[in-house]
Every structure is written in C-alpha cells, then in structure tokens.
Image (spheres, rainbow, N blue to C red):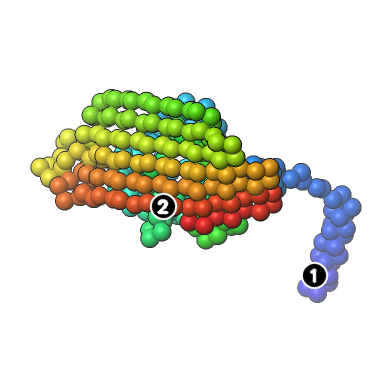
C-alpha cells in the first residue's frame, strides 16, 4: 500500500509540471454595470443592457411587465404589479431570493428604490417612457453594492434634460384602463430641470378562474398618481442632481378584505465627478 501511494504522488506531480508548461489564459469578460455613468470593468457575470428603444418596443404597461423576457428576471408570484400586492413584488434574478423580500437591488439614477422595510419594489413609481437605459446584472457577483444585491442589481437611468422639451400621452384599453402621462425638461445654462407625472386607473380583472370564484372575490386593480422632479447642475468634470419622487396608490387585491393604500416619497442628492460618486437619500 505504501509503494502504491508513493507512485500516485509521482504521477500527479509530473502531470502538474506538464500543465504548468502549457498555461492557458482566459480573456476577461468586459461588461458594464453603472450607477450614474458608463464604466467598463472586468466582471465574472454578464450584464444585460436595454436602451430606450428596446424598453419602448416591449409589451406591458408597467416596467416589470416589460422586463419579463430578460432571462432570470421574475417577481415573487410572477404576477403583474397592476394586480399584485406590493409586498409580493420582490425581484428575483436567477432564482436567488424568490420571496416577497427582494434580494435584488433596484437603483434609479444611482438611488436605491427598494422599500426600506421589506425590500420589495413599487413598480408603479417608474414610467417606462422616461427610462433611457436599463442595466441588469444577475447573480451574486455584484457584492460591491452590499447585502441588498445578493441576487443582482437592476440599474434604471433617466435621460439628461433637453432644451424646451414637452411630452404628453393618453392611453386607454380594456378592464377600464386609463393612463395619462406628461413630461417636461429644459436647460438654463449649467442648470437643468426635468419633471414627470402619471395618472393611472383601472377597473381591474378577476385573478381566479370563474369555476372556483366565490362571492368574496372581486376584481383586482390599482389606481395611482406618481410624480418626479429632478434638478441638475452640470460642469466639465462634475454633476450634482437633486431628485424627488412621490407616489399615491389605492389597490384592490382580489377580495373585499384585501385592500391597501400607499403614500410614499423620496428625496435624493447625487454628486459625481471623474472617479468619484456619492449619493445621499
């Protein structure tokens, strides 16, 4: 037995020497995951990038519906935010953290928008028409963002203000859907201002089949009002942004006793310059 073990050690050491002579170097995977600006860095996981045209061409009313075809992206109960209770809107990437408490960090212009109590995300706060770029990093390789990003990171970036820009839209559909949106932006020298508002209402629809539907079941739907205001200061090497967001929401979750209302607001200050970025919210 001793002779056999010695022989095996010699063979293994010879194989290690042969492999050492033919060292194979893998090319790094160049990807990007951003907070406020583009960066290029080596990362062990791929990053999905969606521009404004790609987001606009995808079907869905809210942003979570438009991200459903991104591999690995899902909500807790896989139900649209139009009829799902906010506590079940936790994001799951690659099956990590599939619960109401999201294990994925969602950023809007570098500011976290996960609920500070339960970690879920109010997807009604975001208008897909005002998103310039989305970057999704799936998996735990994004540990640089802290413990909220165990499942990954979803970074939402809004466009830079434009001179004297106005936009308005109204949409309607079945289930009593009415969706009114308005945007405005302008530049005043080194300063910029952007504003957005959205009013949405729907009668909702039943979320259980008619064959098992009882008297307690009602249509699930949501009515909400959301508004954003962002003030920017630009210079050659730095940028300072002050952003506010307000949401008022009334929701029926499918029965007479499953109703909830939400009112929330955030204010964030973001300062960035070359090789330096700081956010306070």
Residue at 26 percent across and 40 percent down: it is 222
* In this rendering, position of residue 201 left or right of residue 273: left
> In the displayed image of the protein, which residue is found farthest to the bottom?
2
Front in this rendered view, residue 219 or 247: 247
Query: Is any part of residue 104 visible from this angle?
Result: no
Relative image position of residue 127 (x, y in whole percent): 41, 36
Question: Which of disc 2 and disc 1 is earlier in sequence?
Answer: 1
* Mark in front: 1 vs 2: 2
Query: Is any part of residue 274 visible from this angle?
Result: yes
Task: Give the residue number, with chain letter if any, for mark 2.
Answer: 266
Q: In which quarter of the image is residue 4?
A: bottom right
Q: In which quarter of the image is the N terminus?
A: bottom right
Relative image position of residue 217 (x, y in whole percent): 15, 42
Front in this rendered view, residue 162 or 221: 162
Relative image position of residue 248 (x, y in whole percent): 30, 46
Front in this rendered view, residue 139 or 116: 116
* Crowd band around label 2 with a 10 angstrom C-alpha radius: few (<14), some (14–19), many (20+): some
Residue at 25 percent across and 45 percent down: it is 250
* Crowd band around label 1 with a 10 angstrom C-alpha radius: few (<14), some (14–19), many (20+): few
Residue at 52 percent across and 61 percent down: it is 147
**SS assignment at label 1:** helix
Task: Give the residue number, with chain letter if any, for mark 1.
Answer: 5
Relative image position of residue 86 (x, y in whole percent): 33, 49
């Amino acid at each position: 037995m001793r002779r056999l073990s010695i022989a095996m050690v010699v063979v293994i050491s010879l194989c290690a020497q042969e492999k050492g002579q033919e060292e194979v170097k893998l090319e790094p995977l160049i990807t990007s995951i951003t907070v406020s600006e583009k960066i290029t860095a080596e990362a062990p996981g791929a990053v999905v990038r969606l521009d404004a045209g790609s987001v606009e061409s995808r079907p869905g009313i809210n942003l979570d519906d438009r991200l459903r075809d991104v591999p690995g992206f899902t909500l807790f109960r896989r139900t649209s935010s139009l009829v799902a209770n906010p506590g079940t809107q936790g994001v799951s990437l690659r099956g990590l953290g599939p619960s109401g408490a999201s294990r994925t960090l969602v950023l809007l212009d570098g500011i976290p928008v996960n609920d500070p109590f339960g970690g879920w995300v109010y997807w009604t706060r975001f208008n897909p028409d005002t998103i310039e770029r989305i970057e999704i990093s799936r998996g735990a390789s994004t540990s640089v963002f802290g413990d909220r990003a165990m499942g990954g990171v979803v970074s939402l970036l809004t466009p830079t203000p434009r001179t004297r820009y106005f936009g308005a839209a109204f949409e309607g559909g079945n289930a009593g859907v009415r969706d009114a949106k308005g945007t405005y932006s302008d530049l005043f020298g080194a300063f910029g201002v952007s504003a957005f508002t959205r009013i949405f209402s729907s009668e909702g629809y039943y979320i259980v089949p008619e064959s098992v539907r009882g008297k307690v079941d009602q249509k699930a739907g949501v009515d909400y009002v959301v508004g954003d205001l962002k003030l920017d200061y630009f210079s050659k090497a730095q940028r300072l942004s002050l952003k506010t967001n307000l949401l008022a929401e009334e929701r029926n979750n499918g029965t007479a006793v499953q109703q909830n209302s939400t009112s929330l607001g955030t204010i964030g200050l973001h300062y960035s310059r070359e090789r330096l970025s700081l956010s306070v919210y």
